[in-house]
Amino acid sequence: MATWDDVRRLALALPETSERTSYGTAAWAVKDKGFVWERPLRKSDVAALGPAAPDGPILAARTPDEGVKFALVADDPGVYFTTPHFDGYPAILVRLEEIAVPELEELITEAWLCRAPKRLAKEFLGEMP
């Protein structure tokens, strides 16, 4: 399914996006606001998830709000999940190897729209002349 190369390609295709490192891992930002990032599980995450803790690469992505996060988890728990670390925070964790590239593109674009300046988001959506 999806790879870090797909994440990089999709994120950098969005306007004014840059790639950087955050805590030693890859992260993508629009105007210095992170919207997707590599998020390896920490010991506390593995302990909280127990046997359900995935082994593969994990992507974190901003969501518009926690309602969207919980809807994604409910809709496809084989792809989306969260940990107590993200309680109260609008971000979702993604099993990168389980998500289809078209769905990844939609997720990354939505995350970008959450963090992009309003003017830039409107331009991107074609709402400005």
Image (cartoon, rainbow, N blue to C red):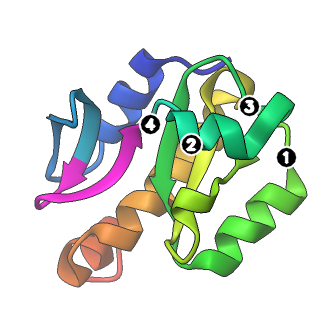
Badge 4 crowding class, 10 Å Cα cut-off, few under 14, some 14 to 19, many 20 or more, is: some
The residue under label 1 is 77
Q: Amino acid at mark 1?
A: Pro
Q: Secondary structure at mark 1?
A: loop
Residue 58 screen position, x and y as percent: 55, 31
Residue 48 screen position, x and y as percent: 71, 46
Q: Is residue 115 magenta?
A: no
The residue under label 2 is 44
Q: Quadrant of residue 102?
A: top right
Which marked residue is nearer to the observer: mark 2 or mark 3? Answer: 2
Rendered-image quadrant of the C terminus: bottom left
The residue under label 3 is 53
Dominant secondary-structure state across the stretch colored magenta: strand
Q: Is residue 50 left or right of residue 86?
A: right
Q: Is residue 56 left or right of residue 12?
A: right
Residue 10: assigned label = none
Residue 39: assigned label = 4
Q: Quadrant of residue 18?
A: top left
Residue 113 screen position, x and y as percent: 39, 67
Report the front residue among 69 and 45: 45
Which marked residue is nearer to the observer: mark 1 or mark 2? Answer: 2
Q: Secondary structure at mark 4?
A: loop
Between the residue at mark 1 and the residue at mark 2, the CA separation in whole angstroms equals 20 Å
- Looking at the rendering, the stretch of residues picked out in magenta corresponds to 29-39
